[in-house]
Image: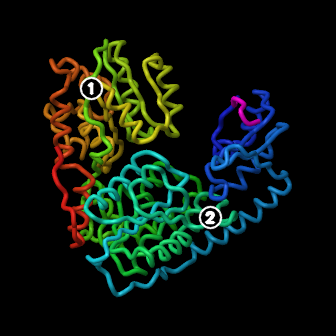
């Protein structure tokens, strides 16, 4: 089985949702062997369910390949044994969920010391999404701010529930990985997220004995209470990175099934606990800050800390080769408001020699591929798939124009602060972006970018045309944007803003970079 080219590639979650369709597809394709690829078998959620789905495959050979040992094939258990295992695991997960549902708010006791110590220049950071998220804006945000603390003379100790992404590992001094959860606790993703609070807390408190922190830093995550509990136990401030209410996002975008709504009840309670426990809720935009107060945060504790760029990671702009047409660049995870569909459709309003490079991956990518083919522009698009942060910046640096066609639907203001926006600026290439809340506030039309109407492919195409028709093809726009990004929008400055809010020192003050 090893070394063979796969005939069918399918996400395990898709197979679980439609077992009958999965089996039918394998029969149609005359597949004879199935391999389950996993980054870390001892930590992945849905482990027993996925292995049962593999066991149900109508094939002769079945195995599990753990990418930490890619040369080994682990045999899959029998259908009967895995069915029994599923029942037992479901009972374990059910007890965990029931316990959390009926629990009173008996949170960890508050230690008397509630301010950081200026003598202990350690940040204790938490990352609970190991194995789930490897690249993208979330990783860049957390990596960037932690690296900003280090640039200011602090050291960072990171607690994770698995091997951290390389970009994040490079931004910290010490890593402590929590012990793997029992298999039953990982029966579904939400039960694993609930159980991870205990493991993360134990690992963090042990690490704090070796690296006593002056603050705890955590990204707001669904069903997470670890950061709030740890900060209370240690008596140090919690800085809660607030991109949005995850409960709000789930309610509006993702979790519609009755079981999912059950977890929303727990999630809402935990999110309230987090915002009330935080000394600083670092909201990425004014709209996000308003959302935090709506969710229960004290307005006096909410600080707008926009996203930024790590200047050291961005290559110096170099001359582009002479070529016909132009190459547009975009990076993202194909999210609801990233506007990639607008970028794709804009090609219909641009000359045939204008191409689009889409960097990244996500659940909606295949829908976008089908859309591009339906519109007849598929042959003008390059899809890189998921690449490292450094590779993404390198690809974007070789584009003529960088596009940020964000969209927003609904009555509430757009609350995002796109990391890509600040990276685009620092790359020194001309930017065409939506005139949308913070994006329109950070960019000045005709000076650091060209702004267009959100959700309008024709407006985006007109913006691109406007840049390409300039005598310098937007070079001055790029220079202005880069200068502003490196002077005003670095992670070092954002970290300094947080430390200043907590009255903590910055041994190496942030400096303007040219």
Q: Is residue 67 above or below residue 93?
A: above
Residue at figure coordinates x 79%, y 41% from the top left: 57
Range of magenta residues: 1-6
Secondary element at image label 1: helix
Q: How is the image coloured?
A: rainbow
Q: CA distance from mark 1 to mark 2?
A: 50 Å
| Helix, strand or loop status at disc 2 | loop
Percent x, y for residue 171?
38, 55
Label tally: 2
Residue matched to label 2? 180
Name the spot of residue 158 as percent of width and height, x first.
44, 64
Q: Is residue 37 above or below residue 183?
A: above
Residue placed most toward the observer, 323 or 251:
323
Judge left or right: residue 438 versus residue 229. Answer: left
| Relative depth, front residue between 127 and 186 | 127
User: What crowding class fits label 2: few (fewer than 14 Cα within 10 Å), some (14-19), or many (20 or more)?
Assistant: some
Residue that badge 1 annotates: 459
Classify the position of the C terminus by image quarter: top left
In the picture, the quarter occupied by the N terminus is: top right
Q: Residue at x 65, y 37 (%)?
A: 10
Compare residues 6 and 16 and report the one nearer the observer. 6
């Amino acid at each position: 089985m090893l070394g063979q080219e796969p005939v069918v590639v399918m996400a395990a979650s898709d197979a679980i949702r439609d077992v009958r369709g999965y089996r039918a597809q394998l029969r149609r394709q005359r597949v004879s062997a199935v391999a389950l690829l996993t980054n870390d078998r001892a930590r992945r959620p849905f482990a027993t369910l996925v292995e049962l789905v593999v066991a149900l495959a109508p094939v002769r050979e079945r195995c599990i390949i753990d990418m930490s040992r890619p040369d080994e094939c682990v045999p899959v258990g029998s259908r009967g044994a895995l069915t029994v295992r599923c029942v037992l695991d479901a009972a374990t997960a059910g007890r965990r969920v029931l316990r959390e549902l009926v629990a009173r708010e008996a949170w960890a006791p508050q230690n008397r010391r509630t301010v950081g110590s200026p003598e202990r220049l350690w940040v204790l950071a938490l990352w609970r999404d190991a194995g789930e998220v490897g690249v993208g804006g979330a990783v860049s945000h957390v990596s960037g701010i932690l690296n900003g603390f280090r640039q200011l003379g602090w050291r960072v100790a990171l607690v994770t529930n698995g091997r951290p992404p390389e970009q994040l590992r490079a931004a910290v001094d010490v890593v402590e990985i929590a012990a793997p959860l029992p298999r039953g606790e990982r029966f579904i993703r939400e039960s694993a997220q609930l159980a991870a609070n205990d493991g993360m807390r134990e690992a963090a408190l042990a690490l704090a004995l070796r690296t006593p922190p002056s603050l705890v830093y955590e990204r707001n995550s669904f069903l997470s209470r670890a950061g709030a509990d740890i900060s209370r136990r240690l008596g140090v401030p919690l800085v809660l990175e607030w991109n949005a209410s995850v409960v709000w996002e789930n309610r509006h975008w993702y979790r519609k099934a009755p079981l999912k709504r059950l977890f929303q009840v727990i999630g809402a309670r935990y999110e309230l606990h987090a915002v009330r426990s935080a000394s600083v809720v670092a909201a990425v935009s004014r709209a996000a800050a308003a959302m935090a107060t709506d969710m229960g945060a004290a307005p006096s504790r909410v600080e707008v800390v926009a996203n930024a760029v790590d200047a050291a990671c961005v290559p110096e702009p170099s001359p582009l080769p002479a070529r016909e047409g132009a190459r547009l660049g975009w990076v993202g995870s194909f999210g609801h408001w990233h506007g990639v569909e607008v970028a794709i459709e804009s090609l219909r309003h641009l000359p045939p020699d204008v191409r689009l490079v889409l960097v990244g991956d996500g659940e909606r990518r295949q829908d976008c591929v089908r859309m591009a083919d339906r519109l007849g522009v598929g042959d003008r698009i390059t899809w890189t798939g998921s690449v490292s942060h450094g590779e993404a910046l390198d690809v974007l640096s070789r584009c003529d124009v960088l596009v940020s066609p964000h969209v927003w639907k609904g009555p509430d203001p757009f609350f995002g602060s796109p990391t890509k926006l600040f990276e685009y600026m620092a790359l020194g290439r001309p930017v065409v972006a939506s005139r949308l809340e913070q994006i329109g506030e950070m960019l000045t039309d005709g000076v650091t970018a060209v702004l267009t109407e959100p959700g309008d492919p024709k407006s985006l195409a007109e913006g691109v045309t406007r840049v390409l028709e300039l005598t310098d093809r937007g070079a001055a726009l790029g220079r202005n944007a880069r200068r502003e990004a490196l002077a005003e929008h670095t992670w070092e400055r954002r970290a300094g803003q947080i430390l200043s809010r907590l009255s903590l020192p910055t041994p190496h003050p942030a400096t303007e970079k040219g």
